Image (spheres, helix red, strand yellow):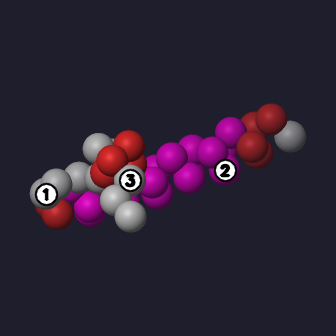
Amino acid sequence: MDNSFFSKFTPKEPKFFPLLESLAEVSHKSAEQLITCVK
């Protein structure tokens, strides 16, 4: 079943996947830093 709502968010070009991977890593590290600052 093709979900058209989520298919809009998937990148059409595979060159964006490394960019999304690095963006996820940066946001994960910043979330960890935020958690340590709040504690």
Q: Secondary structure at mark 2?
A: helix
Q: Earlier in the sequence, mark 2 or mark 1?
A: 1
Instruction: Report whether 2 appears left or right of 36.
Output: left
Q: Secondary structure at mark 1?
A: loop
| Res 20 visible | no
Q: Secondary structure at mark 3?
A: loop
Q: Quadrant of the C terminus?
A: top right
Span highlighted in magenta in the image: 16-34
**CA distance separating discs 2 and 1:** 30 Å
Q: Which residue is pictured at 75% across the width and 43% down the height?
A: 35
Q: Which residue is pictured at 75% across the width and 37% down the height?
A: 37
Amino acid type at circle 3 is Asn
Image depth: mark 3 or mark 1 in front? 3
| 7 is higher (above) or lower (below) than 21 | above
**Disc on res. 25:** none
Amino acid type at circle 1 is Glu
Residue reaching furthest to the top: 38
Q: Which residue is mark 1?
A: 13
Residue 20 on the magenta segment: yes
- Asked if the residues shown at circle 2 and circle 3 are in contact, with their CB atoms under 8 angstroms apart, the answer is no
Estimate how packed mark 2 is, as few (under 14), some (14 to 19) or many (20 or more) residues with alpha carbons within 10 Å: few
Foreground residue among 18 and 6: 6
Q: Which residue is mark 3?
A: 3
Q: Which residue is mark 2?
A: 32
**CA distance separating discs 2 and 3:** 32 Å
Where residue 25 sits: x, y (%)?
A: 46, 57
| Residue 16 falls in image quadrant | bottom left
Amino acid type at circle 2 is Glu
Instruction: Report whether 23 appears left or right of 34.
Output: left
Q: Quadrant of the N terminus?
A: bottom left
Where residue 17 sits: x, y (%)?
A: 26, 61
Image depth: mark 2 or mark 1 in front? 1
